[in-house]
Amino acid sequence: MTTANGAGSRSVSARSEVTAFGGSPSSAERRRAVFISDFAHLDRAFDEVAALLLDPEAAWLTAAELSASWQRFSLTAGEARRSGSCVIVPVRWEPQSLERLLPILEADIELSGLGDGHSRLSMNGRYGVPFAQLGVAIDRLAMHRVAEMAVRRFLSDLAGTLESA
């Protein structure tokens, strides 16, 4: 498994969209939305990993929930779906404590094939920064790095689980 370096994580400007779990964000939420992305390469064929992600009874979700709970977040996964040559699983992370201080992350976990028995697992999502402009400043100074580290750790744990399953 190879994880992304710092160049793999990025944030981009907010845009209007419908969230993975329904509803459209308000204009204020869009202005404070921060996008986050990371990926890991798996030494396992796409079809093998896709079968695991598409199986609602598979152990990967339990392992992912444990990884999220270790980081003090609860994880809710939506229904996995195949979209062309990818598998997409919508997820929602919510803080288990300090709910007013920490944001909710809505993201998609995406699996794509790289050929030669390798796959790419990526996570692309967004979170709303609390506390208006003060929150944006705090996010820029430190919290975005914390969010990147949490996503990277979660994705690395998930990739390891899927490789060994």
Image (spheres, rainbow, N blue to C red):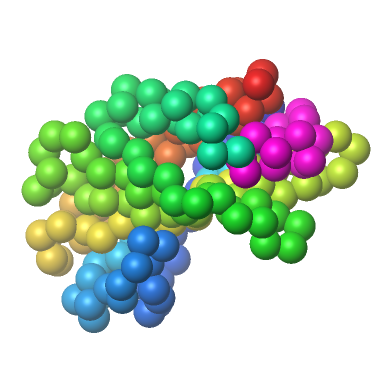
Say whether residue 50 is magenta.
yes
Image quadrant in which the C terminus is located: top right
Asked which quadrant contains residue 17, the reply is: bottom left
Residue 139 picture location, percent across and down: 25, 52
> Which residue shows up at 28% across the image and 35% down it?
73
Q: What residue is rendered at 38% in x and 79% in y? A: 16
Whether residue 129 sits left or right of residue 1 in the image: it is left
The residue sitting at 70% across, 42% down in the picture is 50
- Which region shows up in magenta? 42-54
Main secondary structure found in the magenta portion: helix
Q: Does the magenta stretch include residue 71?
A: no
137 shown above or below 99: below
Q: In the drawing, does residue 84 fall left or right of residue 130?
A: right
Image position, residue 29 (x, y; %): 23, 71
Task: Determine the residue located farthest toward the top in the rendered image.
Answer: 164
Residue 62 percent across, percent down from the top left: 45, 26
Name the residue at the front extreme: 57
Residue 88 in the image, given as x and y percentages of width and height:
58, 53
- Where residue 68 sits, quadrant-wise, is top left
Most foreground residue, 34 or 104: 104
Residue 71 visible within the image: yes
